[in-house]
Image (cartoon, rainbow, N blue to C red):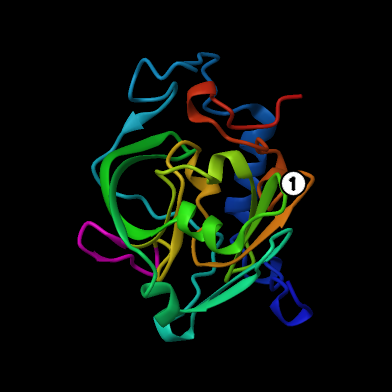
């Protein structure tokens, strides 16, 4: 990303107590059960509880961003970098998917209906270079998180703008957020503004603060325990 697209600093706007608590959870291994279910025998991953609402979690800053103010930049190790305006994004192929969500704070919500642009379509447009193996996601609040390209390149991954028949609210990451149901929800960056393809894995915001580099709920990869 260019200098003008660099992520703004987070620290001035953070709810310090929340951040400190989450870092303490990582150090203490809070919520870990020691159980795993790598074969997905159960719909509910280990240590999770099912909820009916959609809890709001953020870093203390909610960008006030309307659709026409939004854009998405994709760069790094790709053959064709792109920058979509809101109108260009909405002109891309759209699909509706029903997926489950699993938050590292131990709640899960089943059967969420999202509408958005498939990640596979984005990959077709930018054509990652052979050495690209990971992504870094950048959000409008300065948040970052890393992903393996292999997890992003799946048919259940969406650049989503609609949930349950309505535009995704600002509190939940609107106008557009990633939805990647196979990993804990902190990997599904809210207010997504940029995707950079890279050859080596790099830690994002929570990964630098003790959270797992991948975050598979069925393997209970909540924290970095090494």
Residue occupying the far bottom of the picture: 68
**Count of picture labels:** 1
Residue 112: x and y in percent read 27, 46
Position above or below: 87 against 212? below
Task: Find disc 1 in the rendering and name its residue.
Answer: 208
Query: Which quarter of the figure has residue 110?
Result: top left
Residue 11: x and y in percent read 70, 66
Query: In the shown orientation, is residue 160 left or right of residue 151?
Result: left
The residue shown at (41%, 44%) is 155
Is 166 included in the stretch rendered in magenta?
yes
Residue 20: x and y in percent read 66, 48
The residue shown at (74%, 46%) is 208
Position above or below: 181 against 54? above
The overriding secondary structure of the stretch rendered in magenta is loop
The residue shown at (50%, 67%) is 191
Query: In the shown orientation, is residue 160 left or right of residue 152?
Result: left
Residue 64: x and y in percent read 46, 79
Position above or below: 219 against 51? above
Closer to the camera in the image, 23 or 174: 174
Q: Secondary structure at mark 1?
A: helix
Query: In the shown orientation, is residue 144 left or right of residue 54?
Result: right
Give, as a single range, the part of the protein colored magenta. 162-171
Is 64 included in the stretch rendered in magenta?
no
In the picture, which quadrant includes the N terminus? bottom right
Residue occupying the far left of the picture: 165
The residue shown at (32%, 62%) is 94
Closer to the camera in the image, 48 or 41: 41
In the picture, which quadrant includes the C terminus? top right
Position above or below: 99 against 217? below
């Amino acid at each position: 990303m260019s200098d003008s697209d660099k992520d703004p600093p987070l620290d001035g706007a953070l709810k310090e107590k929340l951040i400190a608590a989450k870092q303490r959870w990582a150090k203490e291994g809070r919520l870990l059960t020691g159980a795993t279910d790598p074969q997905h025998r159960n719909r509910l991953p280990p240590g999770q509880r099912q909820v009916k609402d959609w809890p709001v979690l953020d870093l203390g800053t909610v960008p006030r961003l309307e659709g026409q103010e939004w854009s998405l930049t994709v760069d790094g190790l790709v053959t064709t970098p792109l920058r979509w305006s809101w109108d260009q994004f909405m002109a891309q192929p759209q699909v509706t998917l029903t997926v489950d969500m699993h938050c590292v704070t131990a709640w899960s919500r089943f059967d969420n209906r999202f509408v958005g642009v498939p990640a596979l379509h984005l990959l077709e447009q930018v054509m990652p270079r052979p050495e690209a193996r990971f992504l870094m996601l950048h959000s409008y609040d300065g948040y970052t998180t890393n992903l393996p390209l292999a997890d992003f390149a799946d048919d259940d991954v969406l650049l989503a703008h609609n949930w349950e028949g309505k535009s995704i609210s600002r509190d939940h990451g609107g106008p557009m957020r990633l939805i990647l149901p196979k990993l804990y929800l902190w990997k599904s960056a809210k207010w997504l503004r940029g995707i950079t393809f890279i050859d080596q894995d790099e830690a994002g915001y929570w990964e630098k603060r003790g959270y797992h580099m991948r975050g598979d709920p069925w393997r209970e990869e909540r924290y970095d325990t090494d």
